[in-house]
Amino acid sequence: MAETFDISLDSLAGRSVAPGNGAAAHLSVASVASHLNGATFFLETFGCQMNDHDSEKVAGVLLSRGYRQVESPEAASLVLYNTCSIREKAAQKVFSRLGEYRTKQAAGQVIGVLGCVAQQEGEDIFERAPWVSLVCGSASYRKLPELLARVEAGNQRVTGLDTDTDETFETPVTRRDNPWRAYLTIIEGCDKACAYCVVPYTRGPERSRASDSVLKEVRELAELGYSEVQLLGQTVNSYADPSSRRRRFSELLLAVADVPGMRRVRFTTSHPRDFGADIVAALETQPRLCNHVHLPVQSGSTRVLRAMTRTYTRAEYLEKIAMLRGARRPIAITTDIIVGFPGETEEDFGETLSLLDEVRYDGMFSFKYSPRPNTPSLAMPDAISEEEKSRRLAILQKKQGEIQGERNAALVGTKFEILVSGKSRRENQWSGHSGCHKVVNFTSQRRELLGTYVQVLVTGAGHNSLVGQQVT
Ligand code: 5AD
Ligand code: SF4
């Protein structure tokens, strides 16, 4: 794993979420169909937070159709994999999961592939894994009820593979997994066409949700007891309100933060091109907007950035960083970096290393370039060997680890407000995130801290997390 911080859109871990927690209890019973008595589903999610949240919405659709969620594929009548294809390894994982499961498939059990691999591979999945009967890409989820009805009627090969939709995936019920932090997609798809990236092919063009609809959902979340919301989008700050209100992204941020009951508002992922001074000004003036920005740079070399069609130079990116560093309150900055893009020279790589020194990020996700189907970089010459990519990745991560160690050490003695989200098996040990998204493990003699906000004094620091004790 290349990640050194835990907020990426692509953490790659395959997760199945235990049913029944979070806001499950808030599902409207009236909407539950009765004709599917006994139908159960198992849903495993790979990849990014957008996928996590799509899975929450898919679970909502299934629950409202009368399905019950179960914790193992063996116990389910419908087994769904929500897949990621951002790098080859992630896509392979799905086929190995399908392969593993083949021998275990029970009679009448339906297997479906959702998400980016479904979109990318389409009907070929039926050839590679004939035991699959549903293939539905991420841009077609709004058709899910209709597709499920066909599966339930016994159709063997059901597909939803449109990408030309101008609609977003909104469901009347969403079964959220985390009881305190709610994800909320405000923009789907991507129009940026970075040379290495499959997202524009798998998730289709950019579509923003009307700002009033976003605000209505935030108010509902607050009423359900959520105090933290994370606005999601592949390029969240490219948000373009399709309604007549025409709220800018920064205006939407401020409006979300004004919803009574909301205490923390996050957003990810920002694209440097659309990151303007108005966003920094919003962060400066409204403390409920978390002081953390994830601003992927991908490379420190202007030459490589140009080859990647990232639409900014190193200098332009650094101007955005200067804007953030000049803000009236400290703002944590994290990034994504790709090493070994075709043609990346030792000198280019050196510029990425020097960028780390210049910016001193609070966190970084780093990846070896992975050639992906349909992308322009597939045809680029001067591929870098796997061995060399691994070498560069190791150097990069070592450097960033040192920087994070130093940055975190400087925080010893300071206080953070932590939203408590974890309890250790060890007595009096808790964990949570600060507003700037640091993981803090701390001791407290109090009980029932989960979901509450506490003040923690930092007493120690590692590369990836802080240690502390509760002070109030
Ligand atoms: N190879 C390696 N990393 C990639 N990413 C996107 N596409 C690729 C690829 N083909 C990384 C980028 C992006 C993050 C979500 O995944 O760094 O910001
Ligand atoms: Fe992919 Fe680039 Fe869009 Fe991000 S901005 S999703 S890297 S095409």
Image (cartoon, rainbow, N blue to C red):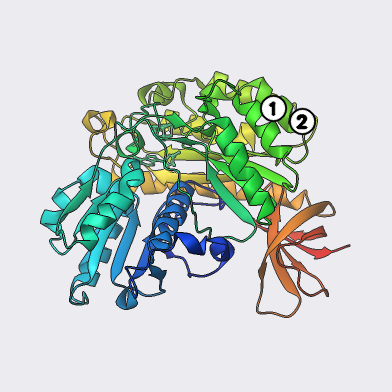
Which of the 4 image quadrants contains residue 197? top left
Q: Secondary structure at mark 1?
A: helix
Quadrant occupied by the N terminus? bottom left
Q: Residue at x 77, y 34 (%)?
A: 286
Q: Give the percent coordinates (x, y) of residue 145.
A: 32, 52
Residue 72 in the figure: left or right of residue 222: left
| Residue position marked by numbered label 2 in the rendering | 284
Which residue matches tag 1?
A: 280
Q: Position of residue 392 (x, y in %)?
A: 42, 43
Crowd band around label 1 with a 10 angstrom C-alpha radius: few (<14), some (14–19), many (20+) = many
Q: How many marks?
A: 2
Q: CA distance from mark 1 to mark 2?
A: 6 Å
The answer to whether mark 1 and mark 2 are in CB contact below 8 A is yes
For ligand 1, which image quadrant applies? top left
Residue at image point 48% right, 51% down: 53
Residue 376's image quarter? top left
Q: Observer-nearest residue: 143 or 448?
A: 143
Residue type of the residue flagged with mark 1 = Val
Q: Horizontal and vertical percent for residue 239?
A: 52, 28
- Image quarter (top left, top right, bottom left or bottom right) of the C terminus: bottom right
**Amino acid type at image mark 2:** Glu
Pointer 2: residues within 10 angstroms few (<14), some, or many (20+)? Answer: some
Residue 388 visible in the current orientation: no
Where residue 261 appears, x then y in whole percent? Answer: 74, 48
Q: Residue at x 21, y 55 (%)?
A: 150
* Residue 276 can be seen in this image: yes
Q: Is 4 placed above or below 152 here?
A: above
Q: Residue at x 77, y 48 (%)?
A: 410
Which disc number belongs to residue 161? Answer: none
